[in-house]
Image: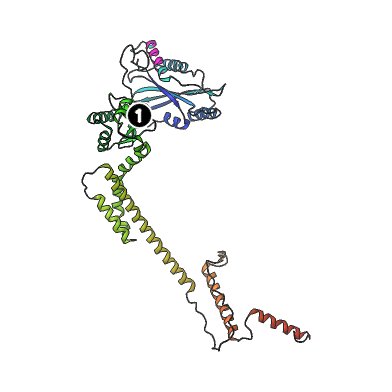
Amino acid sequence: MTVVIKGKSVAGGMRLASHLERLDTNERMELIELRDVAATDLRGALQEMEAVASGCPNCQKPFYHASINTRADEHLTPEQRMASIDRLEEKLGLTGQPRVVVVHEKDGREHCHIVWLRIDLDRMRVISDSHNYRNHELVARALEREFGHARVQGAHVERDGQARPERTPSHKEMQQAARTGVSPQQAKQLMTELWRMTDNGQAFQAALDEKGWMLARGDRRDFVAVDPEGGTHSLARRIEGAKAKDVRERLADLDPRSLPGVAEAKQAQQQVVRAPQMTTSIAAAAPERAEPAAGSATMAATVAATVAAPAAPRGKEESRAMDAAARSLEGVASGAARVADGLATLASRAIEFLSDFFGGASSPSPSHEQGPTAPPPSLAPEPSPAAGFVAPSKSEQTIEEFLEQERREWQQQHVALQNLRDAGPAITSAEDLQEESEQKRSRDRGGGQSL
């Protein structure tokens, strides 16, 4: 029986639970064991483990996630499965730790996942995961002998003079291949071909660019390649016969600092992929924007015609520049159309409001003319709905009734002040009226004329 064991320390309990619960990529998912946890479900168990790990200082990866795989035509019995898990647990130094066991069936092949808590609960310290790949192979070879099946040649133990076997794609690489459609084998074939066709870094970079790939500065390595779908590939792992030292020597004429980072390269590749969809949306949106703003419609139509017309083959840099220009023009056209619509709506509402508010109001004419007199009293300004306006309650009167009442009161005040002005200089202000009233009351009381 062929036994393949993979595993590493990880973080993110809910992300791990989502992966283990997937049924879109698995035909069957079965929770086999929950050990030393109070929860009765997978998510609850991982949350509980994560909560315990929060009390451990400097613990960034509290879980150890491993998988045990066999060939599609080989199956482990339940007893063999648990014996294999216990053997691996002992070799990794995780004996007695809280754990979760899940079995998946995919394309008729069963494999099991085990998640352990890496925190020593007595000391609240992380259990080391050093030499884990070697320990995986030691357990796998022992299980093959114990079960009486053929041995698989490993890369770390029992080499017996054999060449190191080719590295198999990791789980992360397989997930990337499913997401992007670019398999590790396809990437290796292309990059090996380009490597053999070129003899320096600049030529290799140009060859990648011509195929739609980008050379980038790696986060942990000097150089990586980003495929057209945004997948990341290590040069040393994708070029047959080349090691990291060979890659550094060949690309010595390139300064990694002059290259985009992985995130920048991925973003650039995604923009190139989205460009055809964006040009289609621009062409479809141009007729709709013709009415609100003729200038913006002309601009959008120009962009649509430019991107829709057949173009001569061009390099990736030129393509990105033209796509960026098209997006900028489309944004300007869209903004101009929105501004024009907003100004038109605002002006229409303002005219309508002023017409309704001041409709029919006119200043009364004075009853007669008079020569120069003292400065007339200041006329009260017309009430403004924007200054100190308090809307009445709906139960008392409507807004229209309230505004009409305000207009009538203003007209009455305007007429009264106009009459005071026509009366002459004898009465010119409210203070004069008050003083005359006081003098009259004094005379009525017999006090004589006020001094």
The colour scheme of the drawn protein is rainbow
Quadrant in the picture for residue 259: top left
Where does label 1 land, which residue? 173
Up the image or down, 135 lies above or below 59; here it is above
Answer yes or no: is residue 102 visible.
Answer: no
Who is closer to the viewer here, 327 or 74?
A: 327
Screen quadrant of the N terminus: top left
Residue 375 at what x, y percent from top left?
58, 82
Q: What residue type is labelled 1?
A: Glu
- Horizontal and vertical percent for residue 173? 35, 29
Residue segment shown in magenta: 136-146
Q: Can residue 7 be seen in this view?
A: yes
Quarter of the image for the C terminus: give it: bottom right
Q: Which of 87 and 135 is in front in this view?
A: 135
Give the residue displayed 48% in from the left and 18% down from the top. 93
Q: Disc count in the image? A: 1
